[in-house]
Image (cartoon, rainbow, N blue to C red):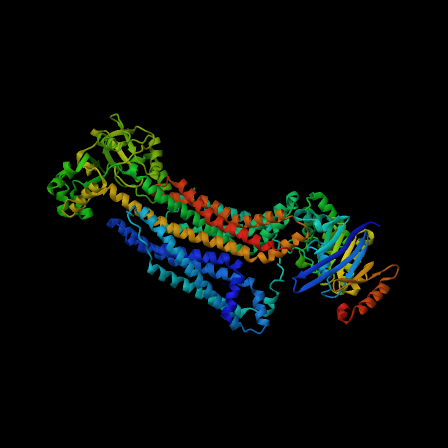
Amino acid sequence: MLFKLSLKNIKKSFKDYAIYFFTLILGVAIFYVFNAIESQTVLLKVTSSTREIIDLMVNMLSGVSVFVSFVLGFLIIFASRFLMKRRNKEFGIYLTLGMSKGKISKILLCETIIIGIISLAVGLLIGVALSQLMSIFVANMFEADMTEFTFIFSSKATIKTLIYFGIMYLLVMIFNTVSISKCKLIHLLQASRKSENIKMKNSVVCLITFIIAVCILGYAYACVTINVEQLDTADKIFIPIILGVVGTFLVVWSLSGLVLKIVMNIKKLYYKGLNSFTLRQISSKINTTVFSMSIICLMLFVTICVLSSSLSIKNSMTANLTSLAPIDIELSKTRNISKEKQEEFSYSDEMVAESYNTIAESLEKVGFDLQKYFRDMVNVNIYATDELTVEDTLGNKLEETKELYPYLTYHVAETIMKLSDYNKVAMLYGNETYELEDNEYLIVADFEQWINLRNPALKDNTIITLNDKEYYPKYQECQDGFVAISNNHINAGIIVVPNHAVTENWLEEEKLLANYNAVNDEERKEIENIIINLNGDGIYLNASTKLSIYEASVGLGSLVTFIGLYLGIIFLLSSAAILALKELSESTDNKERFNMLRKLGTDEKLINKALFRQIFIFFMFPLVLAIIHSIFGIMFCDYILMSFGNEQLLPSIIMTAIFLIIIYGGYFLITYFCSKNIIKETL
Amino acid sequence: MEKILELSKVEKYYGNKSSLTKALNNISFSVEKKEFVAIMGASGSGKTTLLNCISTIDRVTAGHIFVAGEDITKLKGNSLNKFRREELGFIFQDFNLLDTLTAYENIALALSIQNVNVNEIDQRIKEVAKKLNIKDVLDKYPYQMSGGQKQRVASARAIITNPKLILADEPTGALDSKSSKMLLESFNYLNQELDATILMVTHDAFTASYATRVIFIKDGKIFNEIHKGDSTRKEFFDKIIDVVTLLGGDYSDAL
C-alpha cells in the first residue's frame, strides 16, 4: 500500500521531480564517467612516463570524487528539502486522516528508494555510454593509439558510484525523517496560505552596505592583480579569498534592495506593463536566498576560473612545444668542477674527474656513435662567475627591484654565453642572431617576469664589468630567445657577451644540441631508448628530449584538464540545479499570481515575457557577478600559471563559455519551459 | 436606460452524457447602467458559474452574453484579455492582491497593463484612494493590512480603470461584520456617486440588502427577483429573508 502510494506520488509529481531527476541522473553519469577513466587508461599503449602521470591522475580524480560527492550530497539534500516544502499540504492531509508520522516517513523512504534506484540505473546506463566517448577523448588527450574500439565497463567505478550515491540517499532519508518528525500539522495545512512577509530593506543601509561591499571586492581584486607580487606566501591568498566571499555575500544582500529602490524611482520604467510585478518577484526571491545565491555565485566563479585555466594549460603546454623545443635532444653536462664546488655540493670524486671530459669524449667512452645517431649538432659552453651576479646586472635598480620582489635571491651568478656560441644556437633554432661591439652586451630571456625585472636596469644603461673591462647594454630591453629546450618560457636571462670577454676557467656547463638522425617517430624512439640506457654508465650527462618534454606536458595538461572538467561540470550542474529547483518549487505560488494577472486581463504575451525576464534575471544575477569576479580571478590564475605559458587564454575562455551556455543555459531553458507549463493552466 | 449587461438563454453544462450537470439552465436577465445587482443562491446553485461566464473566465455552453452591446461569448484570445482589462473590474472573496506588491503598486498594475502613463496612474490612484479611504495604507503590503483594507484596495483596483461593469464574487466572504459594512457602504458610494454598475454574487442576505435589486438562483435557474425600490435597507433585508425562507431549508446558512 505504502509502495503504491509512493509510486503514485512520484508519477503525479513527475513534473516537479523532472529537474531533480535529471540532475541526479547527470550527477551519477558524470561520477561514473570520471571514475571509469582508470579502467579505460589501463588498455592504452603509452610510455612509462605517461603511465606515471595517468596513475597520478587516477589518484587525484578519486580524491576529487570525494569532494564532488560532498557537493552532490549537499545538492541532493537541498533539493529534497525544496520538494518536501511543496508537499506540505499533502503530508497535512495524511496526518489529518490519521496516518502516523512514522508511516509518512516510510512513504518518503519508499520514494527515495524508488528515485534512487531509477536514477542510479539510468545514470549508470548513460554513464557507461558516455564513457565510451570518453575513452576516445582520453586516448586523444594522451595521444595514445586507438586502433580498435573496445567496449569498456568498469565494475570498480560502478560499485564506487553505487556506494557513494547510496550513502547520499541514506542521508536524504535520515534528513527527511527528521524533518517530518519535527513538523506540526497546523503549519503543514496552512503552508500554502502563509503569505510572504516582505521586509523592505532600508535603502540607506543598502547603499552603505553596497559601497562597503564594492570597496571590499575592489581591494580583493587589487590584491590578486595589481598587488599580486605581495602575495608571496601561500597563506596570504586567504585574505583576498575571505574578502571575496564576504564581499559577494554583501553585494547579493544589498544589490537586490538597491536595484529595486533605484528602478522604483524611475517611475516611467517601474509602472510600465508588468515591470513592477517582475521586479518585486525577483527581489523577494533574491532576498530569501541571499545565502544560496552567494554560494552559487562563488561556485560559478570557481567553475569559470577552473575551466578556463585548466583548458588553457593543456592548450599552451602543447602549443609552445614546436617553438620552445625545436630540436630533438639537449645534452648538458656540468664541467670542470672545482675543489670548492666539490666540497660545497659534495660531488663524488668520480664525477669531478669525469667533469673534465667533454660531452663528445664521454659519449665516445661508452661507445655511442655521435655521427651515426645525431645530426645538426651544436656544441656550446655556458659560463658563470661570481664577478657577475644578478645584483650586478640590476645595477642601480637593485634596491627598487628588491622592494618589488623581496624573496628572490640576488647574490647568484648570472649565466654567460659567448656571442658566437649563442648565435650558433639561435641559427639552429631559427631564432634571431646578434652582433656586438667590443664593449657591448645583451640579455636574452623569455620568462616574462624576469624580463620585467631586467628591463628597467637595461634602460638605465647598467654597465657590467668582466675582467675589469666595462660593457654597455646594446639594447634597452631583453631580447627574445633561449638555449635550454622546455615546454615553457623559462629562460630567466642569459648574458651574451663578445667572445673575448669570457675567461675559459669560468666554464660551468657544456651543452650539446642535436636532432636525431632519424626519418620517423619510431626511429626517434629507438635512438631515445639508446640514450636513456646510457645513463648509469658513469658519464653524468643530463638529457632533455623533445619527446619526453612532450609527453610530460601532454600528460600534465591532460591531468589538469580532466580534474578541471570534472569539478567545473559538477559545480556548474549544482548551481544551475539549485536555481532551477528554487524557481520551480515556487511555481505554485507563481501560478496563483499569474492567474491573478490573467484575471486582470493581462495578455498572455506579456505574462510570458514577465516570466522569461523573471527567470532570466534570476539566473543571470549570480552569473554576472561571477563573471566580474572571474575577470580578476583569471588574471590571477594567469599570473600564477605564467610559467606554464598562458598565451592560449582566449580559446579556453571560449570553451568555458560553451560549457556554461550548454549546461547553465540548458537548465535555464528547462526551467523556463517547465514554469511556463505550470502557470499555463487555464483560469 | 442603457443596458450594460444582457444575458440571453445562457446555459452551462458540466460532465458528459452519462452524468450531465446543468450548472446554468436557460438564464436570461439584464443589468442597466448604474444598477447594483446582487445574485443570491445557496452553494451549488450556479451563482459562481454565472459570474465566471460573465467575466469570460469560463465559457457558456449555449446562449449569449452582451456587455455594452458586444457579444462576449464570441471573443477569443487577446481580445478576451483586452475586454477583461478594459471593460471589467473584479473583486474577489480572497482579495487576490499580489502579496509581493504594495497597495499602491497593486492598484497601479491594473493601469500599467493598459499602458497608462505614470503621471496619470499616480493622479488616478490618489483620487480613488481618497474616495475609498485607503490613503494611509497605500504604501503597505497586503500582509500588513486588515481584511477590510485589503478588500477596499481590491475595490480600488477594480474601479480605477473605469470599467463598464464591476463583478464582485462574495466580496464580504472573508470579512468580519464591521469591515463588511464599511465595504458595502463604499460599494454604495461607488454605485451612487461614481455611477458604477455592480454585479455582486453573495449568499449573505445582509450583503445583498445593500443592492438595488436581488436575483435569486436555484439549481441553475432564476427563482425570484426583487427590487429595493423606495424601501429602506432594513425593509429590503426583511424582504430578502422572506424569499430566502421560501427557497427552502437548505438555505439555513443565509444568516
Q: Please give left or right for residue B152 compared with residue A683 in the image.
A: right
Q: Please tell me in which quadrant of the rendered image residue A330 appears.
A: top left
- In the rendered image, which quarter contains the C terminus of chain B? bottom right
Please say if A345 is above or below A461: below
The reply to whether residue B138 is visible in this rendering is yes
User: Which sits in the foreground, A200 or A393?
Assistant: A200
Q: What percent of the width, then of the height, locates residue A121?
A: 41, 61
User: Which sits in the foreground, B105 or A641?
Assistant: B105
Q: What percent of the width, then of the height, locates residue A105?
A: 50, 70
Q: Please give left or right for residue A164 compared with residue A374 in the image.
A: right
User: Which sits in the foreground, B244 or A558?
Assistant: B244
Task: Name the residue located 73 percent from the left edge and 52 percent from the top edge.
Answer: B89
The reply to whether residue B129 is visible in this rendering is no
Spot the residue most to the right: B230
Q: What percent of the width, then of the height, locates residue A312?
A: 37, 43
Q: Please tell me in which quadrant of the rendered image residue A87 appears.
A: bottom right
Q: Please tell me in which quadrant of the rendered image residue A92 appears.
A: bottom right
